[in-house]
Amino acid sequence: MSISNVTDKAFCHGVINSFISNECCWLIENPEIVIFSCDFDKKHFLKELFKELSIYFPCELAQAVKKRQAEFLAGRYAAKQAMAQLKMPSHPLPIISIGKDRCPIWPNGLVGSITHNNTQALCALLVEPHSAGAFIGIDIESYISAEESIGFVELVHTEAELAIILAQGIPVHMATTLIFSAKESLFKALYPQVAKYFDFNCAVVTSCSLEHQQLTFALTKYFPDQNYIKKMFRCSFRLNPQSVVTLITGKW
């Protein structure tokens, strides 16, 4: 499974309104995954857009700043459009509620993940029958600067992990951003199972292939045994001009 060539299968639309634009959706086979992305412009956000786009406005969001409301709207819009591609029988489409940990609560039969940076939102859905016992995590990150990457070393990765990525000819700031994004995707994929927060040092990059746009993780010694999960995970990635997108999926 790879997300490196998704534009080959994507259909795209132009501007819907001043807030949402550049919608794209594609299907990745084996397993069957729907990914929807859209650009959004926070300068054009209005609370009324929730009603206009038929997106549920949760009470938990009432006191949030406009930036957070705009990002939430874009993410839920991506999720709604991803569900629409599944031709789900229910109409209107089911509401994606917010869990106590602020994670999305997906309808029965779906496993999903939502992500955004400052200008783009994405949703990845794993559909039936592949969703049974499955996990999925998607993340997008804008590249940090070379100067910023220096301060991330101890927080995001070890020198050994960084060296694995740099050996592929990826610049250091892109390498650090890639590892950060991949570990964010891993967190999103694992959190529904482990139901607790964990540090980035619980997973170590063991290999990377720029040609196949994939890297692998090994979980540290005690973490998988304590949480009844497997020890090795594979992450697909796509290096865009301004950002990186990572995706982790599989079955328990």
Image: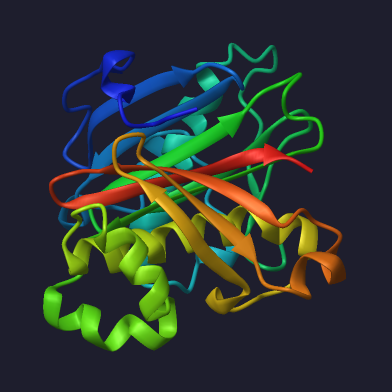
- 142 with respect to 80 (left or right): left
Residue 27 position (above or below residue 117): above
Closer to us: 20 or 34: 34
- 230 with respect to 36 (left or right): right
Question: Looking at the rendering, which quadrant does residue 225 occupy?
Answer: bottom right
Question: Looking at the rendering, which quadrant does residue 226 occupy?
Answer: bottom right
Image spot of residue 128 (x, y percent): 73, 20
Name the image quarter holding the C terminus. Answer: top right
Question: Looking at the rendering, which quadrant does residue 53 occupy?
Answer: top left
Total marks drawn?
0
Residue at 86 percent of width and 60 percent of height: 228
Residue at 20 percent of width and 56 percent of height: 170
Asked whether residue 98 appears in the rendered view, the answer is no
- 96 with respect to 10 (left or right): right
Image spot of residue 245 (x, y percent): 35, 46
Q: How is the image coloured?
A: rainbow
Residue 5 position (above or below residue 59): above
Asked whether residue 215 appears in the rendered view, the answer is yes
Image spot of residue 198 (x, y percent): 65, 76
Residue at 69 percent of width and 12 percent of height: 89
Image spot of residue 204 (x, y percent): 54, 68
